[in-house]
Amino acid sequence: MLVRKYIFVAGGVMSGVGKGVAASAIGKILQSRGFEVTAIKIDPYVNIDAGTMNPTEHGEVFVLDDGTECDQDMGNYERFLDRGLSASNYMTTGSIYLSVIQRERNLGYGGKCVEVVPHIPLEVIARIERAAAKNKADIVITEIGGTVGEYQNVLFLEAVRMMELKKPEDVLLVLVSYLPHQSVGGEQKTKPTQYAVRSLNAAGLQPDIIIARARAPLDKKRKEKIAFNCNIKEEDVISAPDVESIYDVPINFEKDNLSEVILEKLRLEPVGRDMRKWRRFVERTHNVRRPVRIGVVGKYFGTGDFVLADSYISVIEAIRHATAWAGRNHQITWLNAEDRSVLARLRSYDGIVVPGGFGPRGVDGKIAVISTCRKNKIPILGLCYGMQLMVIEFARNVAGLARAHTTEVNAATPHPVIDILPEQRKNIAEKNYGASMRLGAYPTALQKSTVAYRAYHESLISERHRHRYEVNPAYIERLAKKGLVFSGFSPDRKLMEIAELPDSIHPFFMGTQFHPEFQSRPLSPHPLFMAFLNAASRKKK
């Protein structure tokens, strides 16, 4: 029987260095060697989950089948490993403390004095082992959010130390650290990485492998320097230069034989090696030359003077998957919903995506974009809030309901075509927002002879949701009579899941109440994104 192994991925020097992608890529290459792999994310926030975090502060909120609202890295794990994960694969400081406190209140510790150490690290370890058992994993990869020098991570590092003390041959620690350049053409500086390793040493830990992130590949001199000063072998320093796509990373890691290094340290015999499908996908992303211009209309772009693409990372990746398989080179442009000048430029795009969101900001701009796309037959895909705004635009400009709106924005609208779920009214009144939405996977029945049905080729599908508001049943018949087709709905026909116009009227006008982007994978692009990209490609021609 194979002894279960544990790999921890920590970050040094700065955040956003690519720990999540590194953990995902490690999982992919070990999966290709014949092992059952699962991945866990530990977030250092006191928030119970990611559901109440602002996207411009934290990036996208990713949703799992079971409704868990979590960090965007969970999306990378699912995309790389090509499998769904659950709540057992995600934890935050807040959720860990909450569990310990609740157990103490229920006399779960038998009257002991409950302390931060060891009980918090022990809870972390227990969760890791439960996730391993639930996923029947041979190897568990756990990413520790933040950086090693942060106070918030001390308890997670203590959990690693305790596991390593108990199972020294079964635990591996990987440090992902950034090597800055002093100037253009200057040498890569290793001192920040050395300090990151010292911080780990202060926590009683020594990295087994260092993944060195930099603009360019590491030369031998830098590898020697890191190895000597950080007390590891030169072959344990893995070069991780900037690459064109995150999907290049597993292939790049194997140039430094990372899987061999890991398997040798964990005393594992590989079953085989098979990355053919992954390599074929990556080759497709590099070998496409025909461009297709996609505009993404949103409001979660600004963070100071910078654009935060992470707010819509799953949408971006879903577009990338679809364009690769459609033989197109995606050119994505961010269109600010609050900038009315974008309307004049819409015809220059082959397709428009209106992603999800909350609140009144940018709503008028999005509705104007939708109207322009409908009238000028520009392919458009609306996601969640985007679908609701498409219904509002149609109600106002086609169905004659001039003041139609969503009660989320205008509670006094005379035509609430989008309204809150009845069971959520109490939560909203009490300001109980956390995990109060329709979350996770729900079934959707598809109407035959529709654009959606032809995309899926199935009568019943399952998609992930994250919203409180729905199409108001009181207006469905009136909208349908004017030509809006509700091609997807809950099996009991109470909730509308997909709204579209027939392709005889519009090349592609579709909105989904769910988030199809959450289930798009590199090796299996989402059918609705494929249908959208095919329509955009036809417009290009």
Image (spheres, rainbow, N blue to C red):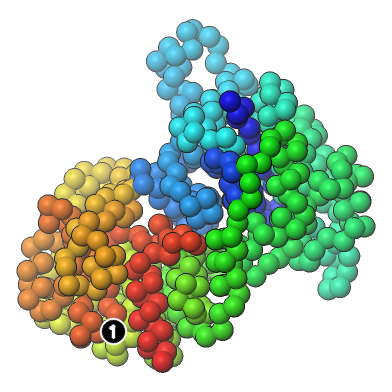
Left or right of residue 344: residue 480:
left
- Residue at the extreme top of the image, as rendered: 111
Residue found at x 46% / y 23%? 101
Q: Is residue 507 above or below residue 391?
A: below
**Most foreground residue, 487 or 349:** 487
Q: Give percent across and percent down for residue 415.
A: 12, 69
Write down the quadrant of residue 373 in the picture.
Answer: bottom left
Q: Give percent across and percent down for residue 123.
A: 54, 25
Q: Is residue 28 visible?
A: yes
Residue under label 1, please give it: 507
- The quarter of the rendered structure image containing the C terminus is bottom left
Q: Is residue 445 above or below residue 266?
A: below
Q: Give percent across and percent down for residue 478.
A: 7, 72
- The quarter of the rendered structure image containing the N terminus is top right
Residue found at x 65% / y 70%? 244
- Callout 1: few (<14), some (14-19), or many (20+) C-alpha neighbours within 10 Å? many
